[in-house]
Image (spheres, rainbow, N blue to C red):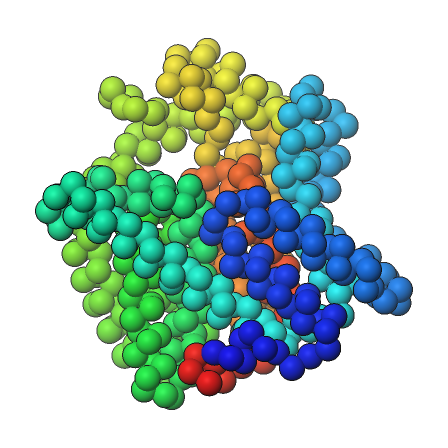
Amino acid sequence: MKALFLIDDNLTNRISYYHLMLILVTLPFDQFFSHVILISFALHTLFTVDRQKIRAVFTTRNYILQAVFFLTLISLTYTAYPAIAGVDITRQLVILLFPVLFSLTSFNIVKYRHHLLLIFSMICVATIAGLYIHAFYIIRYFKLPISALFSNLFINHKFSNPINMHATFLSLQVAVAFFYLSLLLCSERSLKSRIFLIAACILLLTGIVQLGSKAVLVVILIGINIVIPYFLIPATKRFKYVLISSALSILLVASALSINSFKTRFVTGLETDLSNQIVNESVEPRIVRWQAAMHLVQKRPIAGYGAGSELKILGDEYFKEKLYISYLNNLNAHNQYITFLLTTGIIGLLVYLSTLYFGIKTAVKHRDMLFFIFILLIATVSLSESLLNAEKGVYFYSLFFSIFVFSNPEKVISRNYLFT
């Protein structure tokens, strides 16, 4: 554990390391802290920059990582809502900044990638543990039965509410931590460390189920049964692994669905989202809102309506289609692909898809399982959330995309940091 905090490097790089460590540590919590630490990291990087590194900023790799930001910036030229677009630009500024700062810093991200990911994973473990402790405290305080933990009182946003975090965005972070610790588990030899990692993985997995994000849970199942054997298991042992993992996955799903609240969340909720019928729900089904959004896309398919326009034009369309609950709640499309179609049209969607393709291609080329899982998470959650419309989503996207691209995925460090 000592090796995680007292790294052997020069003062400048140690300060950069602690900045990045604190950004990751505060990621599951209030965005204010992440902003302050990022500003401090940016100032530190600029004050200590080697001028010869400036050229490294202007690379194809960086342009791809920053493509979404430049797309929003260009769409500012034709939007009818420049004030709101300015908010979007400000929110997405980190997509521009992280590749620039990682290019300018002398800090070796390749060397310390696994230090940073382990610290982040431990914070996720502590966060989920803290949320369960809070839930048990509430149960005890109000003298509720233990079974209340698996009721609607403590599922989805109600579980993550104590840290004021959107359940899906927290699930994204927890999923990365889960697969990172699973990766460590595959290479760990110490019995003490293996027991700790197994317990941590189980806690994170139950937390993901408790958070109730259908999209993230789908990625978890795909990751366990397809991605892990492809990247980590020798071909001769894959069939045996998949057989066991599939059986355990079926057991997990069956156990979750045997509880009414989880069945309602995962099965009934999905059926409702994909149904055209509106039956006295607290919010209209997603597919009905998507259809309303696509009516608008058909009118301006190439370049869309510009940054900042989504909520305004959707609000008018919701009212026209008598989707009054969505109108009153000022809901966005809840689909990142449709959001790009609305704001930047087919051009914007193709740019976003190209960025994801770059990530997939890089991950496969370097056999980087964690990077592949990250892109899979982004691509899947983009089906049900406008990920880049929220600061937590933008931070997750930009920070981890940059970390994975700037680190060397060919060298996997499997040292035991936990108990040294």
Task: Please tell me which residue is depicted at 76% across the width and 60% down the height of the picture.
Answer: 45
Q: Report whether residue 42 is seen.
A: yes
Horizontal and vertical percent position of residue 368: 54, 71
Q: Is residue 302 above or below residue 18?
A: above
Q: Image quadrant of residue 281?
A: top left
Q: Is residue 81 above or below residue 396?
A: above
Q: Image quadrant of residue 7?
A: bottom right
How many callouts does the rendering have? 0
Task: Please tell me which residue is depicted at 23% across the width and 49% down the height of the picture.
Answer: 137
Q: Nearer the viewer, residue 244 or 180?
A: 180
Q: Nearer the viewer, residue 306 or 113?
A: 113
Horizontal and vertical percent position of residue 75: 71, 31
Using residue 308 as the reference point, say whether residue 215 is left or right of it: left
Horizontal and vertical percent position of residue 18: 62, 66
Using residue 113 as the reference point, say whether residue 76 is left or right of it: right
Q: Report whether residue 292 is seen.
A: no
Task: Please tell me which residue is depicted at 36% across the width and 44% down the height of the picture.
Answer: 162
Using residue 191 as the reference point, say whether residue 176 is left or right of it: right
Q: Residue furthest right?
A: 51
Q: Is residue 95 above or below residue 187?
A: above
Q: Is residue 188 above or below residue 140?
A: below
Task: Please tell me which residue is depicted at 59% across the width and 36% down the height of the picture.
Answer: 340
Q: Image quadrant of residue 266?
A: top left
Horizontal and vertical percent position of residue 407: 63, 70
Q: Residue furthest front?
A: 141
